Amino acid sequence: MNITATVIQWLNGRPHLVAAGLEAFATVRKERPPRFITVERTGGAIDTFRDLPNLAIQVWGQSVAECEDLSNLLRRELPHLTEISEIARVSIGSTYNWPDPDTKQARWQTVISLVVAWPNP
């Protein structure tokens, strides 16, 4: 399972996020929408029966306040990732203001850890 692609697809199907004008991507687009989400795997262990990915989920927007509000909306959605049958657990870590150093665009980051079961062969 490509966990990054799976989480992006799941986020893009969440009605509350869609209504807020958020679309999730794996990378920052050349033509940036006014607000969007990026998802990247930042580490995590893998063993015989499970994947334990750490993901950084970044909400980009027009202001620090907007990003904080959208991050709070995102955090309310993330526990529901267990709707994906292979995801057994979601642990939400810290959320913090993390503006882009190159463009100075407002951005907030939430770090999550998942327990993902490998499908049976």
Image (cartoon, grey):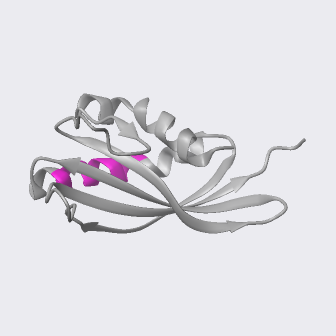
Q: How many numbered marks does the figure carry? A: 0
From which residue to which does the magenta span run? 67-77
Does 21 appear above or below 78?
above
Q: What residue lies at 19% left-to-right and 63% top-to-bottom?
A: 99
Residue 94: image location, x then y, percent: 36, 70
By secondary structure, the bulk of the magenta-drawn segment is best described as helix
- Give x and y (percent) for residue 69: 18, 52
Is 121 displayed left or right of 92 in the figure?
right
Residue at x 54%, y 47% (from the top left corner): 4
Asked if 50 appears above or below 81 in the picture, the reply is below
Please report the residue visible at 50 percent of the width from the left and 34 percent of the height from the top: 9
Query: Horizontal placement of 16 versus 79: left or right?
Result: left
Instruction: Please state if 51 lies on the left or on the right of 90 as rendered.
Output: right
Q: Residue at x 47, y 40 (%)?
A: 8
Residue 27 in the image: above or below residue 55: above
Q: Nearest the camera: 106 or 66?
A: 106
| 110 within the magenta span | no
Q: In which quarter of the image is residue 24?
A: top left
Q: Residue 13 location, x and y as percent? A: 43, 29
Which picture quadrant has residue 19? top left
The quarter holding residue 103 reads bottom left
Quadrant position of the C terminus in the picture: top right
| Viewer-nearest residue: 11 or 45 | 45
Assess whether residue 76 is covered by the magenta stretch. Answer: yes
Q: Left or right? Give the position of 31 relative to 10.
A: left
Q: In which quadrant will I find the N terminus?
A: top right
